[in-house]
Image: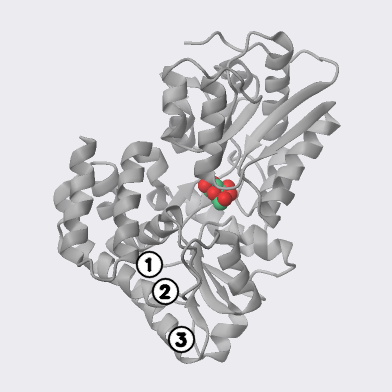
Amino acid sequence: MAAAMPLAVQAAEMQAEVLHWWTSGGESAAVQVFAEKFKENRGAWVDTAIAGGTNARTAGINRIVGGNPPTAMQFNTGKQFDELVSNELLADLDEVAAAQNWRDVLPPALIEAVTREDKFYAIPVNIHGINWLWYNKKVLTEAGIQEPATWPDVVAAGEKLEAAGVVGLAQGGQPWQERTLFNSVLVGHGGTDLYYKIYRDGDQAAVDSPKFREVADLFKKLQGLTDEGSPGRNWNDATAMVITGKAGMQVMGDWAKGEFTAAGLKPDVDYGCTVVGEGGYLMGGDVFVFPVSEDETVKATQVKLAEVMFAPETQIAFNTIKGSVPSRLDVDVSGMDICAQKGAAALKDESRQVPTTDFLISPDLSGAIDDVVTQFWNNAGMTTDEFVQKFVGAMQAAG
Ligand code: GAL
C-alpha cells in the first residue's frame, strides 16, 4: 500500500487542481463553495470540470495512470476507484481521517465504501438520495393529481398529465438515468429484499421472478409517459422541464434540488419531493480521491483540501446548495429544507438505508446491466422475458 500522507504543514500558496463532473447550474454553484473555502485557507483551486460522470472518470483515471494526475478527483461513493487502490495509485488518508475523527462521525455504510483493508482512500463529501420523485405542484394540482405514493400511482398520474397536454415524466435518455429510474422502481415496488437479492447477493432466481417482472412492466409503462426529446437529454434539462411546467414529474437524485434552488423555487411551495413506494432510500453520493505523490507540497495541499471539504461549516454550505445532506452525522441539518429533512430522517432509519449499486457491484457489471436496461427502455419490441434473460445473462457473464 502507498505510504501514509503526512498531516498538513502550513505551506505558502497551495494550488490544487480538482477534476469533477459538476457542470450544471446547481452543481457549479455547489463546487464553488469548496473553491471559496479552500481559498479562505490560502489555497488556490484550479477547476477541471468535465461534463458527464463517465467522461470525467475516464479522463481522470487516464491522467492518473498516465502519470499526470490532478491533485484530487471525484468519484461516486463505492467501487469505482477500486482498481486505482489495488494499483497503489491513491494516497492513504488514514492520518487526516484520524486527525478529523472520520470514524466517529461517518455512517458505517460510508466508512465501508471508502476504506479498503481498513484504510481510508477517499473522502465522502455528501450523501445523495437517488430515488426521489420531483414534481411541479401547480401542474399536478391543476390536473387534479395528488402526490403519488406508489409506482402504479406514478403511472396513473403520468397518464392524467399526458391527457392534460403535459409531459408526464421528464426523462434524460442516457443509460445512468434509465438505471436511476429502473432501480427506483425496483426498490420502491419490488422492495428492498428483492433489490439486495439481485445486487448484493447476485441471486439470478430473484430476477426470474413475478415481482421483478412487475417492476419491468411498470418501467415500460413509464417509458410511455416521456416525450420524443428524451433520448440523449441531460438530467438537468429534464429538471428544467419540471421547473418550467413543461413536464409534471422527474425521477432523479436530489442533486436535482440544486437546480430548483438555482431557479429560485421553494420545496413544498413550487415543487414537491417524495420517495415513492415501500420506503427504501437509495443512498449514493460523491467522494474525492487524492492521487499518490512524492511531492511534499502536493501532499500538504491534499491534506488541507481534505480538511476543508470535511469541515462542518463547509459540509453545511456545500450540501445546502448541492441538494444532498452532509456525509458526517454530527452536523446540525435542522436548518436545511423539507426535502433534506425527509432524506435525513430516512438516513436515521437503518432499515431504510439502501446503498446504490455503486456500493454493491463492480463498474463492469454495472455497465453490463445498464446496457440491458437501456435496450429494454428503448426497444419497444423487447419483451419482459427477453429483458429477464438478458439481465440474468449480464450477471452470469460477470461471474
Ligand atoms: C452523480 C453525482 C451527483 C450529480 C449527478 C449528476 O453521479 O453523485 O453529485 O452530480 O451525478 O451529475
Query: Which label sits in the foreground, 1 or 3?
Result: 3
Q: In this view, does 379 lie above or below 301?
A: below
Q: Is residue 285 visible?
A: no
Alpha carbon distance from label 1 to label 3: 22 Å
Residue at point 74% right, 13% down?
297
Alpha carbon distance from label 2 to label 3: 19 Å
Please give left or right for residue 23 compared with residue 53 in the image. right
Q: Is mark 3 on a helix, strand or loop?
A: helix
Query: Residue 81: horizontal and vertical position, in percent?
Result: 46, 29
Alpha carbon distance from label 1 to label 2: 6 Å
Within 10 Å of disc 1 (Cα), the crowding (few <14, some 14-19, many 20+) is many
Q: Is mark 1 on a helix, strand or loop?
A: loop
Q: Residue under circle 2?
A: 149
- Front residue of 176/218: it is 176
Residue at point 66% right, 76% down?
270
- Front residue of 279/189: it is 189
